[in-house]
Image: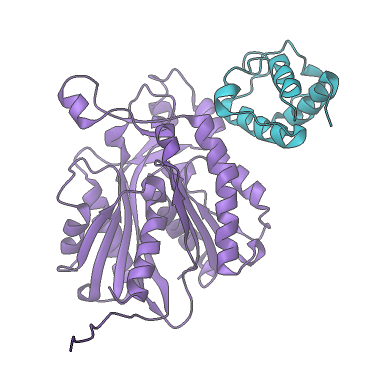
């Protein structure tokens, strides 16, 4: 007779235990970037809401930013690093394809031999990572998971590009996710639309660069197209995430959209009809757009500036190159 | 129900005022969105989406680039009404 397999099961609920953050060491004001794009401080502020962005020193890597953010989240969580059995790093900007950022980060934070993998979902990467961590824990595949969004986008910008480069910053944000007695992570609404793959992404491949066909590849976007999608399509996704979680906009303590552009954040909040009681993440003003890192960085800052948000509900939504998107409601630690 | 040219122009002027604060009196068919009215690409997209809803038309992203003047937009909307 064939033996029956044992199949893993996990706890019914999960929650975020703590956040960690690391930003690039250098604050880069608009005035430092306007020359090559023939622009002005006012032009950048008016179109993006950015006053300054944080960028890393040339020798600082996304791995180091990720390690710092993860270490802070682990320390604040009170979980022994040895108990962490999975590390997920969402990133699109590490200039070395393999080995993964996550395996090195897991080792450096004391979580070796945790399972480790990188995740490429651009600006939705953190929301994708939270979805993964929640599912892995509830399926019994891991007990405590570190999720990091980490980017050094300053390596893939073109100073003469007027579409996206001047928006971008460097940083990493991290969380520790583990079992919970009560629901702490709502259902994830996620998806993709590869028919719009050209709307935002790299403008060349490494092989084209090797063969001298293109300059060093950098990020580009079709700004107006992305803006329309990021507001009017993503508002539908945000509403679905609220509905799936069984909550209303008025139940939220905070709204933390991907920090793409202040104009997107403002229009998004307007379309969602958020009551004034909901605190909105606006970290982009001084950090810039840090892709996968932007949501945990913005949330980390909100929790520092508004400790009363602890225990409240936050709607987070990421959207970006792919196109891909992911949203969920979480309980803030 | 179909909107006349004048109705579309007046409706567009209202949407432009809402988004940018530009007085409706300044919105005329010959005015360029960028050069005369100083409307940036993000505001333009907001106006486009609101115009779609108001007039029941679809204005694809690729088409937005061709709408240089207010008159271009009025013509596109009136000739593409359901």
Q: Is residue A132 left or right of residue B48?
A: left
Residue A38 in the image: state x and y as whole percent: 44, 17
**Percent coordinates x, y for residue A231 in the rendering:** 57, 43
Which of the 4 quarters of the picture holds residue A73?
bottom left
Give residue A42's position: percent from left, percent from top. 54, 27
Identify the chain drawn in cyan: B
Describe residue A156's horizontal placement relative to residue A95 as left or right.
Answer: right
Rendered hue of chain A is purple
Give residue A290's position: percent from left, percent from top. 38, 44
Q: In the rendered view, tell whether residue B31 sits above or below residue A284.
A: above
- Residue plotted at (24% across, 83% down): A6
Camera-nearest residue between A325 and A31: A325
The residue at the point 60 percent across, 69 percent down is A246
Residue A253 in view here: no
Tell me: residue A105, above or below residue A198. Answer: below
Question: Which quadrant of the rendered structure holds the N terminus of chain A?
Answer: bottom left
Image quarter in which the C terminus of chain A is found:
bottom left
Residue situated furthest front in the rendering = A1
In which quadrant of the rendered view does residue A34 lie?
top left
As drawn, which residue projects farthest toward the top?
B30
B38 left or right of A88? right
Task: Look at 63% across and 18% down and name the residue there.
Answer: B67
How was the colour assigned to the protein in this rendering?
by chain
User: Is A146 or A9 nearer to us in this picture?
Assistant: A9
A221 is higher (above) or lower (below) than A271: above
């Amino acid at each position: 007779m064939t033996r029956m397999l044992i199949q893993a099961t996990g706890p019914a609920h999960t929650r975020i235990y703590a956040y960690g953050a690391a930003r690039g060491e250098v604050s880069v004001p608009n005035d430092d970037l306007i020359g090559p794009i023939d622009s002005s401080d006012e032009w950048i502020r008016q179109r993006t809401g950015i006053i300054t962005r944080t960028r890393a020193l040339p020798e600082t890597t996304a791995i180091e930013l990720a390690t710092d953010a993860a270490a802070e989240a682990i320390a604040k969580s009170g979980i022994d690093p040895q108990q962490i059995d999975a590390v997920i790093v969402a990133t699109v900007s590490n200039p070395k394809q393999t080995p993964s950022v996550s395996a090195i980060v897991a080792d450096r934070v004391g979580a070796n031999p945790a399972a480790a993998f990188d995740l490429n979902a651009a600006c939705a990467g953190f929301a994708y990572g939270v979805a993964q961590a929640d599912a892995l824990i509830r399926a019994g595949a891991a007990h405590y998971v570190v999720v990091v969004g980490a980017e050094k986008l300053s390596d893939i910008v073109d100073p003469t590009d007027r579409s996206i480069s001047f928006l971008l910053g460097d940083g990493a944000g991290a969380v520790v996710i583990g079992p919970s007695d009560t629901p702490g992570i709502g259902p994830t609404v996620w998806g993709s639309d590869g028919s719009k793959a050209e709307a935002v992404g790299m403008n060349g491949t490494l092989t084209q660069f090797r063969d001298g066909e293109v300059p060093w590849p950098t990020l580009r976007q079709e700004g107006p197209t992305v803006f329309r999608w990021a507001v009017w399509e993503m508002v539908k996704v945000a509403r679905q995430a609220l509905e799936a979680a069984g909550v209303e906009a008025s139940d939220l303590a905070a709204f933390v959209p991907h920090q793409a552009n202040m104009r997107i954040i403002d229009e998004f909040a307007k379309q969602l009809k958020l009551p004034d009681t909901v605190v909105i993440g606006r970290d982009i003003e001084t950090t810039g757009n840090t892709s996968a890192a932007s949501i945990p960085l913005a949330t980390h800052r909100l929790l520092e500036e508004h400790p009363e948000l602890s225990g409240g509900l936050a709607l987070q939504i990421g959207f970006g190159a792919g196109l891909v998107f992911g949203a969920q409601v979480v309980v803030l630690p | 129900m179909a909107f006349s040219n004048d109705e579309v122009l007046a409706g567009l002027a209202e949407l432009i005022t809402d988004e940018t604060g530009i007085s409706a009196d300044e919105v005329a068919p010959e005015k360029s969105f960028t050069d005369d009215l100083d409307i940036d690409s993000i505001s333009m997209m907001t106006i486009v989406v609101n115009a779609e809803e108001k007039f029941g038309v679809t204005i694809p992203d690729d088409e937005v680039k061709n709408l240089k003047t207010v008159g271009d937009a009025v013509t596109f909307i009136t000739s593409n009404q359901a």
